Every structure is written in C-alpha cells, then in structure tokens.
Image (spheres, helix red, strand yellow):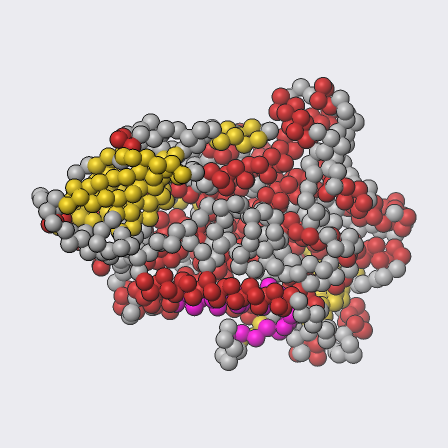
Amino acid sequence: MASASTPENKKINGTIVLIKKRALELVPSEVVQHQAYEILGHKVTLQLISSVIEDSGKEMKGKLGKPTPLRDENSLGNESKFSVTFDWDEEFGTPGAFIIKNFNASEFFLKKLTLEVDDPSGIHFVCNSWVYPAEKYNSDRVFFVNQAWLPSETPVQLRWYREEELLNLRGNGIGKLEEWDRVYDYAHYNDLGDPEKGSTYVRSILGGSAKYPYPRRGRTGRPPTKTDPNSESRLPLLMSFGIYVPRDEKFAPLKMTDFVSIALKVIIQLLVPELESLGNISLNDFNSFEEILKIYGGGINLPDDLLLRSSTEMLKEFIQIAGQEFLKYPMPQVIKADKSAWRTDEEFAREMLAGINPVCICGLKEFPLTSKLDPRVYGDQTSKITRKHIQNQLDALTIEEAIKANQLFVLNHHDTVMPYLRQINMTSAKIYASRTLLFLQKDGTLKPLAIELSLAHPDGDQHGAISKVFTPQEDGVEASIWQLAKAYVSVNDSGVHQLISHWLHTHATIEPFVIATNRQLSVLHPIYKLLHPHFRDTMHINALARQTLLNAGGILEQTVFPTKYAMEMTSIAYKDWIFPEQALPADLIKRGVAIEDPESEQGVRLLIEDYPYAVDGLEIWLAIKSWVQEYCTCYYKTDDMIQKDTELQAWWKELREEGHGDKKDEPWWPKMQTLRELIDSCTIIIWIASALHAAINFGQYPYGGYLPNRPSMSRRFMPEPGSPEYEELKTNPEKGYLRTITPQLQTLIGISAIEILSTHSSDEIYLGQRDTPEWTNDKEPLQAFERFGKKLAEIEEKIIKMNNDKKTKNRIGPIKMPYTLLYPKSEPGLTGKGIPNSISI
C-alpha cells in the first residue's frame, strides 16, 4: 500500500464513484428505467480510518478523521463522480478503511473511492455495494482498502472493524429480512410448497433430515404458513422479484432489464387459460415437425378480434405487443444447418459427449448391467439386455473383449428413475426407467446398440422391473419405434440434466459456499478476493428459481417428467454427492471414461479421445488450477499458515457443518490443514461455478430449443402392435412421435424458460476477467491473473482449431454445430458459448 508521508493538516483529495438508484417499473410492454433519484453530495459523509494509529481511549480501533461531505458532482452516463477533500494529520499515517453515511432519502451503488497520495497509483477502495440511508443500519458502513491480509497480518488498528463487519453480515438469526439488510444466513428448502393452497401444493421440506438431505439456501425470514408452521410462506408470483437476498447479491439494473425483457415470454403461464377460453386458439398438440418450425419464423397466430374479446388488462397489453405473432422464438442451432439430422443415431449418441448433459455417460464394466437399488425393496433390477441383442454389432469383438478394450459405454438412468416410476406414472406423465448401451467405433463416434425401457412391476416393486429391449432399426414402423425409444431416453436425460446435473450439482451445491464465504471471510481475506467473483448473482437466480421454477406447480414441474416429485428426486441424488469427486479429473475417472495417467499434464487419459466436453474441460480445469496455485502460494508459504488462519478455518468448518450440514460427518471432506487441500478445494469451487455450469447451461436453447431433439416429458407408453397408436405410428410417424412427447403448451413454456437461462446478459463477466482492474493492490496476483487470461485465450484458439479438424467428428456432428460451450469468452445474447465467472443465470 502507498505510504502517506504527509505534513501536518495535509489535504488528501479523493474521487468517489457511485451509481444512483433507478426505479425499475416492470410492465408487460417494456422495462422502463426512470430518471435516477437525486443524490445530494452534502448529505453523504466519509470518515477515513487510520491503519497506523489507534483512536484515543479506543484500543484496537484506528483513529477516525473528520466527517467530510462529497462535492462537485460530475455525471458520466450512469455513473456520478464526486470530489472529496479530507483533512488528514501526519500522525494518522495511511488510511486503511473509511466509514460512509448516507443521509439522502434513497440508496445508491458505491463503486469505489480513490485517494490521491504520493504513490502515483493512489490508494484504492473497491466497494461495489449498495449504501442505504444511515437510518436503516444498526452499525456504520465500513469499506476497506483494496489490500489482501490474512487475519494475523491485518494492521491492529483495522482488526476490530474487520471482525465487526463479519458479525454484521451474519445477523442474529431471527426476524424477517428487509432489502437493506446485509445478512447472509442459512435455511432449509421449506418454501417450495404452498400448503395454504391445498394438499396438491404440499411439498417435502428438503434439508435437515436423513430422508431428504439437501444443501442450505439463503434465509429470508418470511413467516411460516398458517397451515404448516414448518413451511415458509411464499410471495405472490407477480412479486417474485421482491424475494430477499442481500442487495449486493441481486442483479444489477442492466442485467435485470435484459432478464425481464426475455422473461416476458413466460407470461404464457398466466395467459394461456384465457386465450383458450376465448376460442379459435388451441395449444394442445403439434401435428408435424414442420408445424413446430413455424414458431421460429411467424410465431403462433392470434385471432383478429382477440384483443376485443379479452377481459384481462395484462393480456390486452401483451396482445398489443405481440400483434399477430404470439411467442416467436430464435432458431435453435441444432436445426439451423439441417432440419432432420437430430434424428440420426450418431447425433443421439454424440450429444452424450458434446450436448447439454455430457456428464452422465459411463464406461461399461460389467455385463449384464446390475442395479444398486436395494433388492429387498425393488427386487431383481438386473438388465434384460442380452448378448443376443448386441453381439452382432461389436465389429467382430466379443462383449468381454469390447469391455476390456474400453469400447462399451452406458447412459444409465435406471436407478435414478425407478424409485419414483410408479408414482410418476400415476400422473399425466408416462415414462420408463432406461439404460442405453453404446459402442465406441474406430472413427471415434459412438453407436447406440440397445435401449432398455423398464416399468415397475404391476404386482409391486419387490417383484422387480418389467423391461423391453429395443435395437436400432432403419425401416418401417420398427424404425419409428426405435425413434420413440430414443425419445424416452431423451426425456429421462433431459430431466436428470435439468434437476441433477444442472440445478443440484451447480446452483444448489454452490449456494452454501456463497453464504459461508460472506459470513466467515473478510473482504480483506485473500481467499475471499479469489472466490468472490465466482459467486456473482448466484443467490439471486437461485431465489428466483425457488419462486417460479422449482416451486409446487412451477415451470419445472410443468415441463419435466418427474412433475411434483422433481425436487424430492434431487434430494435423493444429493445423498451421492461427494465434494472431492466434483473435480473434473476425479469425475471422469469415477465414470470410467478416463484412467489415471501420471505422465499426462492433466493426470488422466481419456478413453474416448474425441470427447469434446472432457477435452476442452480438462484444458480449462488445468488453467484454473494453475491460477489458483499461483494465487494461494502468494499468501500461504507453509501448511502451518493454513492451520493458523482463524477465518479460513471458521469458513471451512461452517461450510461443512452448516452449509452442507446434512453431510457434515462424511469422511471425504478435506480437512483444510494443508496448502494442497486449499488449492484443490478452491479449484473445485471455481470449476463448478464457472466452466461446469457453462457447459451444462448455455447449450440448453441451442440443443433443447427444438424440443423434439430434447423432449422433457412423455404422455403415453410405447405403442403395442394392434393398438390405434401403433397404427398411427405406421401411417403418420411424426404425429405419433409428437403425441407421445411434450405437448404444445409445455413446449412453449419450457423453451421460453431455457431461452432465458441460455442468454448472456450485457454486463456478464467471463472467466479470466474482473469487474475492475484494481481488484487487488498486490502485484504478484495481478501478474498471475494476467497469465491466466492469456492461457484462456490460447485455449480458445486451440478449441477453434479442433472444431475445424474433420477427424474429430464428435465436435461438429451430423447437425454441423461446433462444440463451443467451453469457449471462455462470448458476446451478449444467445450464443451457445462463453464461461461466465459465476452461476449468474
């Protein structure tokens, strides 16, 4: 930090940058940003805090300068710059923090304060926080110099302020939290159901029990429901954006504008019942693939007199916007180059390696496949796929030889689905548990060999499964049956992707890290500075998800096969979650798609060489790990320093015992006693929050925006010979296919939601970037971060070259869509590429 060697009563000039609050009025027609609320500089005061000399009579607290108002406002775009001049006695030494008090009527977003001192770079205080009127706070708002210090290295004069700030962020654990509160605290998932609406809307409480373990979410403090004191009351749907998260965790105004402008399409949930009641419009079924393609061009036409017949003001306004094109969507990349290539077996298999759920395929190690389900409850669940089904498709190899050569793979959604199969099939959904066997061919592509579809035994689960096996067919009704078999697999894969790979393994498991980091690591802590960018917007998108996506009757229950059992299924999946296995190399080895290789730079060798997600992911993983190692070794020279870091130890203890409290006794948790454990843990956290989430999120619309390719529901079972459905499949296979998968209304709701989730906001910050170049004063980390950014740029160039190599067939596929999901950078919008720093959508 710069030294302030100053004469007595020296004036220190500074510049403070803030953004005034703008009112966001959300209406169906547009998002209006009103004029910023006026902020009067003389009603904002700053007091510098010395990091050198203690305040008289206040041991351990730095001496305070005089309260100084802001002056000379200079507005530039959204930002306002104010000048400030401090009286600063020589004996005060270097300022290490400042107190800010806002006596205006409204809050503002404080970006930074820069002090002009002898050092030409100045002293920087990077703030990036909302400051509410002083009357809203029980203690002063304090901001620290942009310096990283371990707790034991912090100047004595700042330690009290450091500890007090953390106490404020933890709160007292009681009461309803308001928007100006800055409290990070834990709660169970007890706000998904709405028991006051009736038994249909009752949902299990997730977390806090052996039956339904779960990561913790952020506490809101809303009162319990009158019907069930253990369930938290919910906000009305139209007040969803008012759900509590600490204000600094909420979307910035620019992102909120982007988000809401796209989210208007989901208003269909509210409008469709009235639209149908008005007649002349039906959203029941698509009858052909050509009919689906029309929604990417002309949209869905509305009757000319619909506006006159509508009684709902919101619907009238929406119709005026839509005109004759109701819900027009961008063309998904999966059908841009070829409208039918998605139907091929090669593309079906390729998407297990380069699609939106490339994290489930496993190496086959036994034949026949067995189940891990308890046979006392579920009977014999051994696979019914026999040698006869697949032996003649293995290029003259025996099954044992193919297994030994690592050429057999499986997409196994049997054990995940089977425990809920009977209940799910009592709803409108009609699904199967599924196993799909695949063969790795000489050209590096996968060939589907057989699909097993299983139902619960009609006489009870203990009698095992009723299974049928389907093999590839090219002609007649048998080819249509095979196409349906692949659709049932895709339905399972779509649900597992959305609920487990995506929601549970990224969004839900990271939120406790966000909370624990803010509660236990000071903004001065080097590990806080390392991890904080990777938590941006996560609590807010998760809170909005609880409010509209994951709740009883919400979008996911309407559009994915487990319906009301969706979140309960994720709780069962969480029982198998192991933190160290979230490391990419460990995951690949566990799934049997890679083996350990000490001679490889990444430590593993892929058994499918052309596995785009794994190939690109390992490059990104190694870059992240190298960056984390360089950064951490700047601050920790010995393992002893890790063990004596009080904040770090409190952070890791709370993360295990509170944030992931249902797994606190698991032996696999790192002990956080060594530098290696710190580096490995931080690498995993950053990997999950950035690259893993990007790989399974931003391809949702490019691949799944055309729902026949990624159906999320099935409404009837496989047609039996002699049935009307079987005859329909003979005469009109497209209609038979579309009447089996997701219906039209759920299709539109689903693709509206994934369009939002797949879109990069205008203010996105990507891996290798920071929101300000002054994020730390320490030179070594800044240099290491610059190297990290250059390495990511090199990786992107390497990916582009691989995508242009015709030998790597899995990178482009029959649909002629290059694998770009792990490109580090992207432009705003629906791009199908880019790795944001955080789970920000």
Q: Is residue 304 visible?
A: yes
Q: Residue at x 72, y 60 (%)?
A: 816
Residue at image location 71% in from the left, 22% down from the top: 307
In front here: 328 or 649?
Answer: 328
Residue 614 location (% of width, % of height): 58, 66
Residue interval drawn in magenta: 603-629
Residue 805 image offset from top left, x and y in percent: 67, 70
Horizontal arrangement in the rendering, residue 344 relative to residue 3 (left or right):
right
> Of helix, strand and loop, which mostly describes the magenta segment?
helix
What percent of the width, then of the height, locates residue 30? 57, 31
The percent coordinates of residue 354 (x first, y second) are 64, 61
Residue 612 located within the stretch drawn in magenta: yes
Q: Nearer the viewer, residue 148 or 235?
A: 148
Q: Residue at x 34, y 39 (%)?
A: 81
770 vs 447: above or below: above
Residue 786 occupies quadrant: bottom left
Please tell me which residue lies in front, 525 or 44: 44
The residue positioned 29% from the left and 69% from the top of the image is: 637
Quarter of the picture containing the N terminus is: bottom left
Residue 10 picture quarter? top left
Q: Is residue 56 left or right of residue 259?
A: left
Residue 164 showing in the rendered view? no
Residue 359 highlighted magenta (yes or no): no
Residue 441 vs 184, above or below: the answer is below
Residue 441 is left or right of residue 93, and the answer is right
Q: Is residue 127 left or right of residue 396?
A: left
